[in-house]
Image (tube, coloured by chain):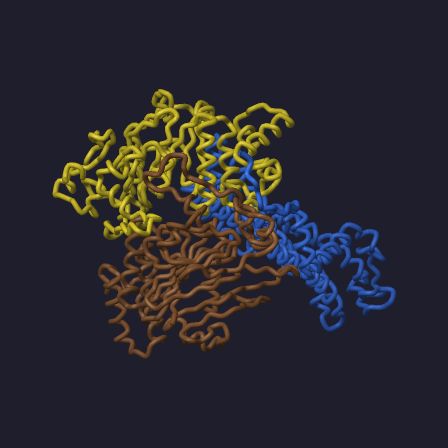
Amino acid sequence: MVENNVNVYKRKPPWVVILKRFLANKMGVVGTVLIVCLVIVALFAPLLEPYSYKEQNIEISNEPPSLSHIMGTDDFGRDLLSRTIRGARISFVVGVLSVLISVVIGVVIGSIAGFYGGMIDLVLTTIADLTWSMPAILIALLLVAIIGAGLESVVIAIGLSYWAQYARLVRGQILSLKSAVFIEATKSLGASDFVILFKHLLPNSLSPVIVAATIGIGNAIVLEATLGFLGMGAQPPTPSWGAMMSNGTAYLFISPWMIIFPGLAMMITVLGFNLFGDALIDIMDVKNKESI
Amino acid sequence: MGKLIEVKDLAVSFDVKGGLLLRTIGTVTAVNNVSFSINTGEILGVVGESGCGKSTLARLILRLIEPNRGSVEFNGTDILKMSKKQLRLQRRHMQMVFQDPYSAMDPRYTIFRSLSEPYQIQGVKLDGEDRHQKIVDLLELVGLSSEHGYAYPHELSGGQKQRADIARALSLNPEFIILDEPTAALDVSVQAQIIKLLEGLRERLKLTFLFISHDLSLVSYFCDRVIVMYLGSIVEIVDADLIGETACHPYTRALIASIFETVPEQKNTQASLEGEVPSPFNLPPGCVFSSRCKFVQPLCHEQTPVLEETPDGGQVACHFPLHEIS
Amino acid sequence: MPILEVNDLHVEFIVDKKKIRPLERVSLEMNSGEVLGMVGETGSGKSLTAHAIMGLTSLVGGEIGGSVTFEGKDLLVLSEKEMQSIRGSQIAFIPQNPMTSLDPVYRVGDQIVEGLCKQVKIGKQQAKQQVIDLMGKLRIPKAKQVFQQYPHQLSGGLKQRIVIAMGLCAHPKILIADEPTTALDVTVQAQIMLLFKEMTMARNISLFLITHDLGVIAQVCDKVAVMYAGNMVEFGRIGEVFSSPRHPYTKALLQCIPRIGMEKGSLAAISGNVPSVDTYPSGCRYHPRCSRADSLCKKTIPTLLKIEGDSRVACHHYLDNKD
């Protein structure tokens, strides 16, 4: 009884298809390269730094870029290149950790809200909306008041400010998928809520979250820089880019390189994440359409 | 040939909440006091237009939705009274093939993986090789090959996807399968293939079907008996072969008249109904069809008719069924 | 002289360096006042034909060939501006899916009036009156009130009638309707389809009806064009095509359709699947599924032959009435 099938389908594993499409997206490749550079710099910071990032040498303070100090020195005579490199590690860690916190909180709350609906959904969504409308800076100030300033506060503050968007994304996906036929089919086979949520609903909801998280890392880095600029982030001598720029404002007309280089480094990093995220969006879009 | 399934007074309605305080402002009656039985080995058809409740009825019978009242007996046991554990085991006996083949499978799973799921969920212990062979057998049973097993849903055609959905429904060896508009999204030639497949499977595996469709011609061809539903109620139950001659509810006759026959010499399609199906929100008392019926009398607005036997062996819920008028 | 004459219409694209022809060998005639049906399954090219005639195909990297003659003019060589003056007023088009044809932010009455005023020199007040009259004729209850409503307030059947009103209001010579009643309940379908035919006859509009439903074609049309995988395989008067189809696909298709009173088990299926655009077989596109196919069918695409009268068939071994 086997049907004679004229339709021959092309079967390439999905990751190969995605990889191919990604490589075709030039901006995405640029973004990836930038991110990879950041990761390498962050990982191998101690090896790459020509000088110690905290070694002070008042005699050569505020020196413009030269052969021995490619990015110049700051007001304490510390090598800016080394500090900028060390700053990459901090930005990377802050970015990734805070987004991780946001994603975990957001996915959990979003899934519960979307799956159970009703009053639970109403309550959780209201909490999410409230969190979303509070500026991260205010949350950070609160936390600093409680825990004290420093990188830990910054990471937690950013993590707690931004989870709402992931919750919304997951909730939205789950709401629309809940009534999909294959979910009903799985229910009719006798599957428990747990199986449906974890084996079907969540895996199908994660792609927008991944894309948002990628761009979120860029946002987190900028936010860390803002908080650092306001003196709430990393404490001296930890060279976060934001703190470096904050420090450098006093010397804007004397040694502007104190602001320029960390600023450039941050711009390039965030650009990298944004390009990568944009490329992901394009690819996810195409993936959902059937190929000709 | 005994009764495999007996449905008694099944009903479900949904409260509609509105306003600031979310108070109940009305009810949507999805299924209203439905009673009928399905004989073992029978193909029972359910036909009706939008809002008639046929899809809701299917989900009630499988207990994917909880009714407000009524009972669904499977081989004498009321499944609505079963515990969660008993119900899960019960699901092995009753399965469903769904309407939209395009989203009936998790898009991230290969067909193989989707077909292994029933075994995993039901805790059927099968080692890798046995399971693989079982699934290959299933695929062949529905006219697919193991190659199709390695594909993802979006790589298959509509007909192939529907076959895979049927394979999944068969995997636990059920006795009873509900088919909810299984061919509505398919081309007519693919529909014919699937119907032939279902004819063969029913013979071979001794299955009982509940076949839901809006297409009266298809239902009367494929099924043994036909239930006609309108706005949540059964208006008529009639023998499929004799539907043209013996149908006596005005709505059933209107459905028959609306068919576009592929016989150009008989230009007999008539639009014998005015207007559209009213909303099931806050249904007025009396017969559900009274607002559009050409033969309506004052009694129809006051008293809801009940299903009664007709001389031809069917059942009709009408105060003035057509065989008594002429 | 026929009001519309299509000769060897074809559409070609180049995708991934391969030439694909999702539509070819379409030749038909439509006389004034006739109802012409075009029937086919998914991928048959029927919608594409309508879009090609209307000049609405988005031709990035493709070309349309052949000729579409309307009242002596070849539409395919006209400029976009010239086509715009023909669309709506001379040849109107009702696309699939009424739900998306209506703009959700404007009242439905205004949408019809806007279309009418663009196509015909007429004042707004007069247009409004004409539209309300037309809505009444289409049996839209309380037409004046419905005129003021927004699309989301109307049921599917009402929306469909509004879209039909948009097509009819400028009294076009030809109305092309693409699946005008899918997604509607069967009883509503019957109402609208019959009404549609009545209206077009009354206004002497030639109707080009595209559908997958052979039943509708049999009851409503005078002639039919059968499409398969981008080719026209048969064309002729309804009575002939339905009682003695010449192309094996037409015959097989008719046997696929269930009817009330049909003997159980007698439904016949066509084996195989409709080929997709990038996997058309060589020669006749139907040959892998045809019981009459031979090596000739595999090698050469059959041309559309004129048989007696209006009938045409594209088959090397077409069925004769004497078979």
Residue B172 at x, y percent in the picture: 50, 27
Residue at 35 percent across and 35 percent down: it is B45
Q: Is residue A246 left or right of residue B168?
A: right
Instruction: In the rendered view, tell whether residue A241 sits above or below residue B177.
Output: below
Residue B7 at x, y percent in the picture: 32, 28
Q: Is residue B324 left or right of residue B278?
A: left
Residue A172 at x, y percent in the picture: 49, 48
- Dividing the picture into quarters, in which one does residue C1 lie? bottom left
Q: Is residue B149 left or right of residue C246?
A: right
Name the foreground residue: C303 vs A252.
C303
Residue at 59 percent across and 54 percent down: it is C283
Whether residue A243 is visible? no
User: Quick one: which residue is furthest to the left in this view?
Assistant: B298
Whether residue B77 is visible? yes
Name the foreground residue: B234 vs B29.
B234
Q: How many marks?
A: 0
Q: Is residue B129 left or right of residue B251?
A: right
Name chain A's colour. blue
User: Quick one: which residue is furthest to the front in this view?
Assistant: C322
Name chain B's colour. yellow
Instruction: In the rendered view, tell whether residue C257 sits above or below residue A237.
Output: above
Name the foreground residue: B47 vs A176.
B47
- Dividing the picture into quarters, in which one does residue A28 lie? bottom right
Instruction: In the rendered view, tell whether residue C110 sits above or below residue B262.
Output: below
Residue at 71 percent across and 70 percent down: it is A252
Quadrant location of the C terminus of chain A?
Answer: bottom right
Residue A166 at x, y percent in the picture: 55, 49
Q: Which chain is brown?
A: C
Name the foreground residue: C190 vs B326.
B326
